C-alpha cells in the first residue's frame, strides 16, 4: 500500500478530477463495478463455506477498496506510518474471520 515511488492512483485521481473528462462513461467506474462484483462473490463464497463471518459483502468491499486507495493516495501526499496498512488489515480480519481462526494465526 505504501509506495512512495509510483502512484497510478494519484494519476487516475488527477485525470478524472479534470472537468473536461466525462464522469458518466469512465473506465474507472466500470472497473470499480467489475471489481465489486468479483469481491462480493468471493466474500459470499467465504460466508457460505463458513470461512468468513456473516457480514455485508458490499460494505466489506467498500472498506477494503477505499481503505487501500486512501492509504495509497495519502502515502503520496505525506509520510505514512508503516503500521497503518497492518492495522487496516487486522481490522478487516476481525470483521471477516471467525474468532477461533483469528487466534490460530
Image (cartoon, rainbow, N blue to C red):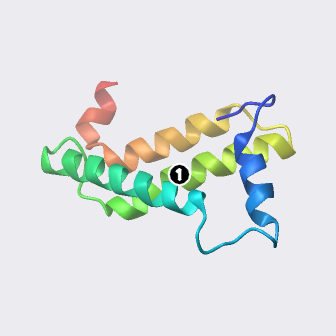
Q: Give percent across and percent down for residue 23.
A: 66, 72
Q: Nearer the viewer, residue 34 or 62?
A: 34
Location of the N terminus (image quadrant):
top right
Provide residue 16's location: percent of width, then percent of height: 73, 62
For the point 77% across and 32% down, the residue is 6
Residue 97: horizontal and vertical position, in percent? 30, 42
Provide the residue designation for mark 1.
65
For the point 32% across and 55% down, the residue is: 40
**For residue 33, which quarter of the picture?**
bottom left
Is residue 59 positioned above or below 43 on the image?
Answer: below
Q: How many marks?
A: 1
Disc 1 is placed on an element classified as helix
Nearer the observer, 32 or 21: 21
Could you say which is closer to the camera, residue 16 or residue 59?
16
In the rendered view, would you say 2 is above or below 15?
above
Determine whether, in the image, residue 53 is placed left or right of residue 81. left
The quarter in which the C terminus is drawn is top left
Q: Residue at x 86, y 46 (%)?
A: 77
- Looking at the image, the residue that sits furthest to the left is 49
| Other residues around mark 1 within 10 Å, as few (<14) / some (14–19) / many (≥20) | some
Could you tell whether 43 is left or right of 17 in the image?
left
- The residue that appears at 25% across and 46% down in the rendered structure is 52
Q: Is residue 59 above or below residue 5?
A: below
Amino acid at each position: 500500500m505504501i509506495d512512495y515511488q509510483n502512484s497510478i492512483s494519484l494519476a487516475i485521481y488527477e485525470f478524472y478530477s479534470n472537468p473536461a473528462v466525462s464522469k458518466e462513461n469512465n473506465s474507472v467506474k466500470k472497473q470499480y463495478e467489475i471489481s465489486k462484483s468479483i469481491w462480493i462473490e468471493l466474500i459470499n463464497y467465504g460466508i457460505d463455506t463458513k470461512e468468513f463471518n456473516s457480514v455485508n459483502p458490499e460494505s466489506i468491499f467498500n472498506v477494503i477498496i477505499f481503505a487501500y486507495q486512501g492509504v495509497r493516495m495519502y502515502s503520496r501526499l505525506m509520510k505514512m506510518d508503516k503500521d497503518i496498512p497492518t492495522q487496516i488489515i487486522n481490522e478487516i480480519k476481525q470483521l471477516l474471520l471467525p474468532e477461533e481462526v483469528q487466534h490460530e494465526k
